[in-house]
Amino acid sequence: MTESHTWPPSLQLLFRQASHQLRLFLRVPVAVFFTIALPFVVLLIINATSGERFLSDTNGDWPVDAFVCVAIAAFTAVSATFTNLANMVPIRREEGVLQRWRSTPLPVWVLVGGHILSAMVIAVLSALFMLGVGVALYGVQISLAAVPALILTMLVATLSFAAMGMAVAAVVPTASAASGIANAIILPMALISNVFIPMEDPPAAIDILANLFPLRPFVDALQAPLHPMNPTTAPQWGSLGVIALWGLVGFAVAVRQFRWNAAPGGSTRRRRSRSQ
Amino acid sequence: MTVPVIKVKDLVVEYRSSAGTIRAVDRLNLTILAGEVYALLGENGAGKTSTVEVIEGHRPRYSGAVQVLGIDPATSGAVRRELRDQIGIVLQTSGVEPEITPREALKLFSSAYRSPRPVSEVIELTDLRDFADQRIGTLSGGQRRRLDLAVAVIGRPKVLFLDEPTTGFDPSARRKAWDLISQLRVDGTTILLTTHYLDEAEYLADRVGMMSKGRMLVEGSPGDLQQAHGQSVMSVKISESDSLGQQELETGVELALNAIPHQASWMGHRLEITTSDTTGVLERLASWAASESLSLSDWSIERPSLEQVFLDLNADDDRGGADD
């Protein structure tokens, strides 16, 4: 009797999982606070204290407040993907939610995809919110020609940072360690990546280091099409390449190391070859 | 009724830990037929959860063969999905996000199955009505266990795995859970149950398997196990006798029951005998009484509880285990 029924369409399942994750996000006040409210407040504070300064980069001058606003838009997208997933997935693992789903016929890719898709939606919405604040308060201008590069940048970056978040979620031992580890990775990276402290002429070592990690390339790639003097409407392929490479590494680690349950005991042995 | 739904052959499960390799399940064989309720019992560390997790496909095995509904649970992809559609699992350690309500959870879980039960039907079935729209985070442990059960049956499973399903229930909730499980059994669901509550196994199970140290100690219906491995307590009153004093009565009984393993104790004229051979005791005692012109009255035979069988068998195994 069961056999006559067909499986529900995979895309429908994926959207259901993603909207479930979005609903959960909205019901966890601390997640909303750290992802959107806190960066917003930081943005207001930095710009209230930075005055009418200008930064020079290779393409010309930026008003500091607009520069910081776009950088923080990138940072919120990273919080929504990397930090959120690295935090929440281990919590769900400890709550037994992942194991619960693994007992059902839901394909694994749909479950993981739902987490990632919802994180990407939150990332895009919160980045748009920051850019909207930039347009309203800090003179950020978004031309139509910049949109394709912005979309591509957001797509590559949110997907890659989501993969890195899943990698951290896979390797952290416990949920309580996860939040510390995720912040220990992302906050120092933000400090050298022009997010909170825009650096006009950083020391060469910091510059090289920042460009090896994925956050600075993301900030650069998002700022380039929005430059007030010389916007570059072509995608920043070099920066996107660095981000995507980190994303692939994250993906590989996540796939290899992912655990379904919080197992305090040792690992199960599996015989390499079976006689039958 | 005679189709095997779960087949386990020579199953070995090993764990690697800092203390070395531990063999949790040691060449276990198990067959569960369609429509059966099978209870797997054992002390903590006996290997029952490891066994069940391998059968569910949640844990890799070291060696051996396992089939559920003709499918190896260790397979992946479409075949695994097919199997998952037909089984329901209540795990000890599984959960649902505390931020949503039971109704939302059931709606979401039902979407993963091909032919789910309606959410409202499952809410009725598992008695979740009163808190179906409360956040799961506000529910008690017992209420959450009921939700676990609800999630496990939402897909209309042919095989249901229940790992200690009533832990944390109050007596009335436990009775309701038993009723639900009995009802599922009537519908033809095959159920593999692990439990610490022997009365639960006695009440629900068609067959019981007792595990110790990764091996199957004994298997059978609760009644068979009680008969084969337990000691019954028989009690009888022996009439006053003019010719026999108390000492002679006791000697007479000992001689009559000479060949039967038993323990006797006296309280005046009331005799209490603990034995596994109740029929033998009955026959010998009756013919002895007849030959001495005594009458026996107030008979009672108390069968051993499954719990007593379990404790005795484990104690025996521990003594035997010292030689391994």
Image (tube, coloured by chain):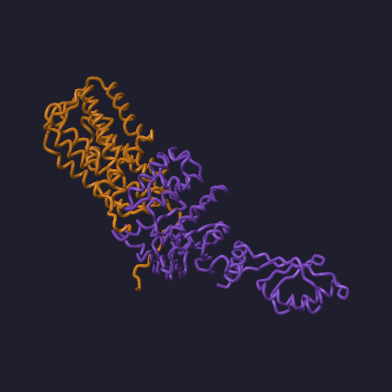
Residue A11 visible? The answer is yes
Q: Where does the image place residue A30, in percent across and percent down from the top left?
A: 38, 34
Q: Nearer the viewer, residue B121 or B20?
A: B121
Q: Quadrant of the N terminus of chain A?
A: bottom left
Quarter of the figure with residue B98? top left
Residue B116 in the figure: left or right of residue B187: left
Q: Position of residue B116 (x, y in %)?
A: 36, 51
Q: Quadrant of residue B278?
A: bottom right
Instruction: Quarter of the image for the C terminus of chain A: give it.
Output: bottom left
Q: How many numbered marks have been drawn onto this rendered protein structure?
A: 0
Q: Residue furthest top?
A: A52
Q: Residue B137: where, in percent of width, then height?
A: 45, 39
In the rendered image of this protein, which colour is used for chain A? orange
Q: Is residue B268 above or below residue B140?
A: below
Q: Colour of chain B?
A: purple
- Residue at 42% across, 52% down: B152
- Along the horizontal axis of the image, is A106 left or right of B135? left
Name the residue: 37% across, 67% down: A271
Reply above or below: B89 against B6: above
Q: Can residue A94 be seen?
A: no
Residue A108 pos. (x, y %): 31, 52
Viewed as shown, does residue A142 lie left or right of B119? left
Q: Which residue shows up at 48% across the image and 59% down it?
A: B193
Taking A135 as reference, is A159 above or below it? below
Q: Nearer the viewer, residue B260 or A161?
A: B260
Q: Residue furthest right?
A: B242
